[in-house]
Amino acid sequence: MILLHNTLTRKTEEFVPIKKGRVGMYTCGPTVYNYAHLGNLRSYVFEDILKRVLRFNEFKVKHVMNITDVGHLTSDADEGEDKMEKGSAREGKTAWEIAEFYTEAFKKDLAELNISEPDIFCKATDHIKEQIALVKKLEKKGFTYRTLDGVYFDTSKLEDYGKLAGLKNQELRAGARVDIGDKKNMTDFALWKFSPPLVKRQMEWESPWGKGFPGWHIECSAMSTKYLGQPFDIHCGGIDHIPVHHTNEIAQSEAAEGKPMANYWLHNEFINVGEGAKMAKSGDNFLTLAVLKEKNIDPLAYRYLLLQTHYRKQLAFSWNALGAAQTGLKNLYTTIAGLPKEKTPNNQGILEQFTAHINNDMDTPAALALIWTNIKDKRASQKLILELDEVLGLEIKNNLEKKPAEEMPEEVKIIARARDDARQNKDWAKSDELRKQLEDLGYTVE
């Protein structure tokens, strides 16, 4: 039995697929106007773990991920500059060139983090016809209206609008403190935006309403329905998607089809960088995998760092924590290299405990702790750990043949010497505290 925390119901529930043994899974991909930052990448690692857990439990997973290469404006209020046009102006390339370059950069990041690619990558620009058809369907059902700048979804027509965020529609409208312009309601959102008069956009298409481009949210509804049907099993993203993007996806899809969009909604928490600020492209805390590699940090050390914190908990990023994760990962490889290769009497019990952890809403911290406990005293075999790594994705097999770990870092030597001094002075409390520090860094303490 797999337990997953469903944002829609606010409960941790047993996962029951629509079709026995099969899972349809849709995850929100990047807007490809810049590199993905570490906060973005946390989402894709979490989704990769979910997919691996499902497959470990012998489900056949059909994974679809969109690539937003048009229509995502700099403001969630359907205002501001198109992010693709912004990238184009920044780099002196066409929006199409920007999209192609950063799509490939994103795929390289996935490979660096050992994230398996989805079965289907679908670009918004390849599905304009499907998006127009969905807007027409919503128009026919009476859910749309036109303004001077586009075709909008009328959220007042949907009684349960905002249910994903836990807000009732009337509460959302009562909280309005902004100029809503031509919109009927604060929460209404663009389905199709008109190209400005006398302006030639790089990305625009003819439609029944005039030349323009799709709103940000419509692509996910159109493409998830095309490839997975409705309802499908699981929809994922970051918690920042809950109040606007995923809320509006649900509104469009359920208004169009008259049935749920997806049965399980899963969301990962933010990464914070100093003073509790979330990592964002608009801030000064924009860190990419390239920055890590410049500092000789293995991208897999970042994956290891992420696995040490549950996906629904905020993660406080620091270079010290990342350095400790890199040290811990190297020591993990070295310790596993010293294990017996074949079965041990304990393998089955360890496998059952590991499965219980990962099936409990993907409790990777507990799963990692279990592995460390059982490799320190060689209770587990290499064969078993390699099987468990099918879920963790730390590329243990590829690292078993590598040279022994580097010389112990100076910071670790200092802690070890301080612990020796504490033991000499019979300060057992201090000794235990320093022992814990060493173990957190991935060192076995005799």
Image: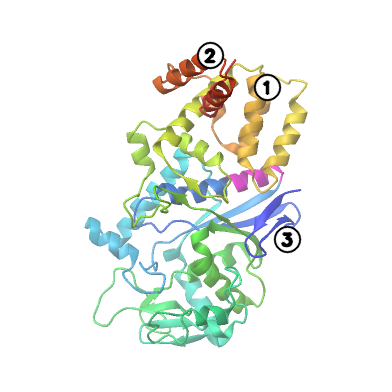
**Mark 1 vs mark 3, CA separation in Å:** 37 Å
The residue identified by callout 3 is 18
Is residue 198 in the magenta section? Answer: no
Tag 3 near tag 2, CB within 8 Å: no
Dot 1 lies on which element? loop
Q: Does 109 sit left or right of 46 as displayed?
A: left
Q: Does 29 sit left or right of 264 as displayed?
A: left
| Residue 208 position within the rendered picture, expressed as x and y whole percent measured from the top left | 43, 84
The residue identified by callout 2 is 425
Near mark 2 (Cα within 10 A), the count class, few <14, some 14-19 or many ≥20, is: few
Q: Between residues 186 and 321, which one lies in front from this camera angle?
A: 321
Q: Between residues 205 and 184, which one lies in front from this camera angle?
A: 184
Q: Is residue 245 above or below residue 180?
A: above
Instruction: Please report the residue visible at 68 percent of the width from the left and 49 percent of the height from the top.
Output: 60
Q: Earlier in the sequence, mark 1 or mark 2?
A: 1
- Residue 387: image quadrant is top right
| Residue 282 position within the rendered picture, expressed as x and y whole percent measured from the top left | 33, 58
| Residue 200 position within the rendered picture, expressed as x and y whole percent measured from the top left | 26, 75
Dot 2 amino acid type = Asn
The residue identified by callout 1 is 381
**Magenta stretch, residue numbers:** 49-58
Q: Earlier in the sequence, mark 1 or mark 3?
A: 3
Dot 2 lies on which element? loop
